[in-house]
Image: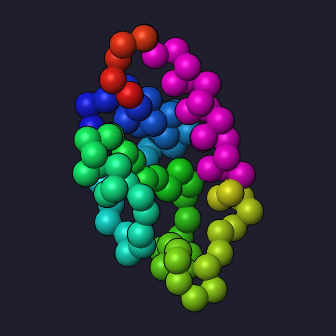
Amino acid sequence: MNTVFYKTLEKVLLDNHPDGAVMPMIIPNYNDCGKFRSKGINSYASNLFEIERKIMHTIHNTNERLPVKALNEGAQIYFDFINEIQTFEQGEEL
């Protein structure tokens, strides 16, 4: 978690949610991160939006859904992240 990618993601999240916290989280779903990590490639899965616990329980489950407000918020955070990550110095490990 000491990479430019992670630090930038953390910065953007805290810029958008100053009272928030960035932390590891286990969620019961599958993603490709394990396959990339097994090859030595840094990989992160993320939820870049704030949702209620009852909505989080629908992720990859029956009646999966995401409120439009959370979708828009997540899109803005990704946009901010992309703009911010462009400033990293060549040679730094993402």
The C terminus lies in quadrant: top left
Q: Which residue is drawn at 55% across and 65% down?
A: 51
Up/down of 94 relative to 65, above or below: above
Up/down of 7 relative to 51, above or below: above
Q: Residue at x 74, y 62 (%)?
A: 68
Q: Is residue 88 magenta?
A: yes
Q: Tell me where residue 32 appears, x and y as whole percent.
A: 42, 58
Up/down of 25 relative to 21, above or below: below
Q: Nearer the viewer, residue 53 or 29?
A: 29
Q: Tell me where residue 60 appears, x and y as whole percent.
A: 52, 77
Q: Nearer the viewer, residue 11 or 35?
A: 35
Q: Residue at x 41, y 69 (%)?
A: 30
Determine whether, in the image, residue 19 is placed left or right of residue 58: left
Q: Does the magenta stretch include residue 91?
A: no
Main SS category, magenta section: helix
Report the magenta residues as a range. Answer: 72-89
Q: Which colour scheme is used?
A: rainbow
Residue at the extreme front = 39
Q: Tell me where residue 81 appears, x and y as whole percent.
A: 56, 33
Determine whether, in the image, residue 33 is placed left or right of residue 49: left
Using the rendered image of the protein, determine whether residue 31 is visible from the camera's viewpoint: yes
Give the mark count: 0
Determine whether, in the image, residue 81 is placed left or right of residue 75: left
